[in-house]
Amino acid sequence: MTTPTLIPPKRTAMSAQKRREAITAYLFLLPTIIGFMLFVLGPMLGAIGLSFFDWNLLSTPEFSGTANYQALLHDIRLGTIFLSTLKIAFSTVFLNVLLGLCFAVLLEQKMPNLFRQFFRLSYFFPFVVSVSAVALIWTFLMNKDLGIINYYLGLIGIERIGWLSSSRWAPVSVVIIAVWKSLGFNVLVFLGGLQTIPKDLYDAAEVDGAGGWSQFRHITLPLLSPTTFFLIVINLINAFQIFAEPYILTQGGPGDASRPIVMYIYEQGFRFFNLGYASTVALVLFVIILLLTLLQFKLSERWTFYQ
């Protein structure tokens, strides 16, 4: 009795074509991969190594072991700055998502197409403007003595507010500008999500007697949950990396009231030339953002619904 032998399948022209397509795809991806390795992965690995050294850019790096990490645990100022960053970040995320949803729903209402396009452009325009230009404009608007905001507040009997010089209002100013700058992106993403919801669902709900609020609560919000989740993740990552707005507006002051953790990293590295400690704080920030992102993915399983 002979044992049957398996004959390997011959390579067909189709498999060769797929192989050529894969090679072509990798060639197109190659510049991005090289850029990622040079400008993202490389600096990350360098920061990990540098966190175990003491280096001021001028002298030879000296191995310090875990000294930078021990210094981080005893850095009281860093704790204060981290709390300020948390307040600014969560306030920015909350307002961006809430206002983005509200404006997107309003833009989806019946109105002339010309008005719709005008408002879309108006909301999105600040997003494409340079952060430096935006911050400089708001610096003049929020000037305590000459700013137009305090001028109009004075007309209604409200005393001048130290938007940029008060420890109470400086973080609020940073949040206002950050939200104004990025709100248009959130509006457009929510608009895209709203347009994917089948209109038949609203028609059926209206036939059943559901009002506008009921339709919004039971149809719009659940079906927008993937979009909402995406925006929360993106906004939170961006909010923890905020830098230009407070750097130009308040220089982190007064004190550390509006100083985000990224500005602290910048100052440690390029003002005090403590590159090892700056790398350590940057790595801790990366871990915090990563853990918060993973936590959001885990919690999203309970409230995110996909069609």
Image: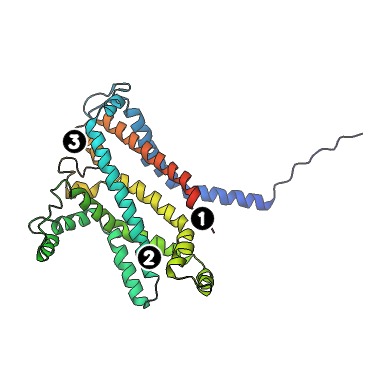
| Frontmost residue, 300 versus 270 | 300
Q: Is residue 2 left or right of residue 61?
A: right
Nearest to N terminus: mark 3 or mark 2: 2
| Residue named by callout 2 | 104
Q: Are marks 3 and 2 in contact (CB under 8 Å)?
A: no
- The residue positioned 40% from the left and 70% from the top of the image is 108
Q: Which mark is residue 150?
A: none
Badge 1 density bin: few <14, some 14–19, many ≥20, Cα 10 Å: few
Tell me residue 149's x, y (percent).
Answer: 14, 61
Q: Which of marks 1 and 3 is nearer the N terminus?
A: 3
Q: What type is the residue that disc 2 sits on?
A: Ala
Q: Report the residue marked by disc 1.
A: 305
- Secondary structure of the residue carrying numbered label 2: helix
Q: Considering only order in the chain, which callout, 1 or 2, is on the residue closer to the N terminus? A: 2
- Mark 3 closeness class: few <14, some 14–19, many ≥20 residues within 10 Å: few
How much space separates mark 3 and mark 2, taking CA atoms? 43 Å
Q: Is mark 1 on a helix, strand or loop?
A: loop
Number of on-image labels: 3
Q: Which residue is drawn at 75% across and 41% down?
A: 8
Structural distance between the alpha carbons of marks 1 and 3: 47 Å
Amino acid type of the residue that numbered disc 3 sits on in the rendered structure: Arg
> Is 300 placed left or right of 257 in the picture?
right
Which residue is depicted at the point 73% across and 46% down?
10
Would you name the residue on which mark 3 appears? Answer: 271
User: The disc labelled 1 sits on which kind of residue?
Assistant: Phe
